[in-house]
């Protein structure tokens, strides 16, 4: 017979049922709070009745998984709540393992028949599954694989690939795990899994080979993380020149701030940075001549290096090549010490904002900038100059009646 506390938690969980006819945004906050209350209630049961938690947590996961199909979770809050529930369920299964075959069936169904959430890792259920559960899970996955249609790219469906890979990882056989991963070498993250597995097994030469192979594929997605691992492997082997050359070649081809940062970190580890820093900045400066879009990257580098005057001068040389966000950052850094310098940039940003007809908040943003411009004029001792500018602005935009009204309300 269930305890009073278990019954209380069960009733709490049943409150997670969601009427699909409700508006997607209605009651989202209350639903999230209830989900967190369920997590706390299940965790409390670990002390008094741990054997009841796997079933209760599974029920909660199922209800929230279904509910999220009809709730607007653009904020991601409910997704976080669901991950917390899955964590409680995994912990509960480790503490009080349920029937391993039933657990295997549920996990397969969750991954292959669900809406795409929640995500989970089989390693969190390794102890609860045991050999019998893993065998059952493998059997079910292979049955699904035989009946499945290839995806749009002719590959095995994603969910089946994930379960196969995680099962191979649980086997503890590194070569088997790599063989399964190698069945679908479509992008750098797959190579990185192989590299990490080999590295953890102490097979650094093999790891380096796979990292180099992964960097040679045409798909550019997420190569940066794989490259970082490859550089680490080179440095660990003592191949410092090779590691730094790899970073420099990439920076030379595409001198972005991110590639500069990578070059600097590696150069600091190899000891090459003091002699190369000025060369790297010069290369990036030259790149802005042919491609002004690099100016924003150069400014970001100067700001990180604490060279605020260089950053400001670069911006002044590339007035129209920078996004508004960068100009505002520069202005806010410059205004306390050089208020006169920021007057013209503020005026330009205000005009740009007033001309942005697709931004329905443009007038409010312009008013905010006008207050900061007023402060700059006052800091220079030229408050009358702001009044003159404001009169001209009113005259120039007198047909924008909504703006003129807001301007009057702002009492500038």
Image: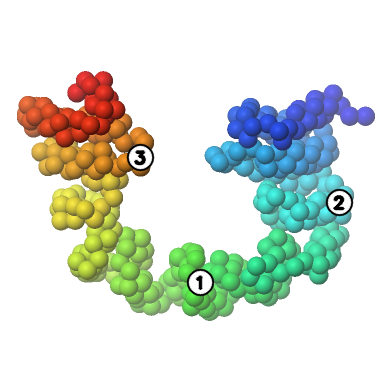
Give the x, y percent position of residue 43.
Answer: 72, 34
| Side of 171 relative to 359 (left or right) | right
The residues tagged by marks 2 and 1 sit, at their Cα atoms, a distance apart of: 39 Å
Q: Which mark is residue 102?
A: 2
Give the camera-side residue of 345 and 58: 345
Query: Which residue bears the numbered disc 3?
Result: 359
Graded by Cα atoms within 10 Å as few (under 14), some (14 to 19) or many (20 or more), the crowding at tag 1 reads: few
Q: Is residue 41 above or below residue 180?
A: above
Task: Please state which of the two labelled residues, at mark 2 or mark 3, is closer to the viewer.
Answer: 3
Q: Residues within 10 Å of mark 2 (few under 14, many from 20)?
A: some
Give x and y (percent) for residue 15.
75, 28
**Residue in view at x 25 percent, y 52 percent:** 322
Residue 267 seen in this snapshot: no
Secondary element at image label 3: loop
Residue at (82% x, 33% y) in the render = 49
Q: Secondary structure at mark 1?
A: loop
Examine the rendering and report whether any part of residue 223 can be seen.
yes
* Residue on which the image places disc 1: 219
């Amino acid at each position: 017979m269930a305890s009073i506390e278990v019954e209380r938690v069960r009733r709490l969980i049943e409150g997670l049922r969601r009427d699909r006819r409700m508006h997607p945004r209605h009651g989202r906050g209350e639903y999230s709070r209830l989900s967190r209350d369920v997590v706390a209630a299940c965790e409390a049961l670990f002390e008094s009745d741990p054997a009841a938690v796997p079933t209760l947590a599974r029920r909660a996961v199922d209800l929230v998984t279904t509910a999220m199909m009809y709730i607007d979770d653009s904020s991601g809050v409910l997704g976080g709540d669901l991950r917390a529930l899955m964590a409680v369920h995994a912990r509960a299964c480790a503490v009080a393992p349920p029937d391993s075959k039933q657990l295997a069936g549920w996990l397969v169904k969750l991954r292959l028949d669900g809406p795409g959430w929640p995500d989970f890792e089989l390693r969190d259920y390794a102890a609860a599954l045991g050999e019998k559960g893993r065998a059952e899970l493998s059997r079910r996955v292979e049955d699904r694989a035989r009946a499945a249609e290839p995806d749009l790219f002719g590959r095995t469906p994603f969910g089946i690939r994930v379960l196969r890979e995680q099962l191979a990882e649980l086997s503890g056989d590194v070569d088997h795990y790599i063989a399964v991963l190698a069945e679908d070498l479509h992008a750098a993250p797959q190579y990185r899994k192989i590299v990490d597995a080999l590295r953890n097994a102490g097979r650094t030469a093999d790891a380096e080979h796979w990292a180099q192979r992964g960097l040679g594929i045409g798909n550019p997605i997420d190569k940066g993380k794989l490259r970082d691992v490859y550089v680490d492997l080179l440095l660990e082997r003592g191949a410092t020149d090779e590691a730094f050359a790899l970073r420099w070649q990439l920076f030379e081809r595409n001198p972005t701030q991110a590639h500069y940062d990578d070059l600097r970190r590696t150069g600091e580890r190899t000891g090459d940075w003091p002699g190369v820093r000025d060369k790297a900045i010069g290369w990036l400066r030259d790149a802005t001549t042919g491609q002004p879009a690099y100016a924003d990257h150069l400014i970001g580098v100067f700001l990180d290096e604490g060279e605020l005057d260089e950053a400001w001068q670069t911006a002044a040389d590339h007035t129209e090549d920078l996004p508004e966000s960068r100009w505002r950052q520069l202005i806010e850094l410059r205004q306390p010490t050089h208020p006169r310098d920021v007057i013209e940039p503020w005026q330009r940003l205000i005009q740009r904002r007033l001309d942005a007809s697709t931004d329905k908040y443009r007038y409010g943003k312009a008013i905010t900038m006008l207050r900061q411009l007023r402060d700059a004029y006052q800091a220079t001792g030229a408050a009358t100059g702001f009044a003159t500018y404001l009169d001209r602005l009113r005259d120039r935009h007198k047909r924008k009646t909504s703006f003129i009204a807001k301007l009057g309300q702002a009492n500038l």
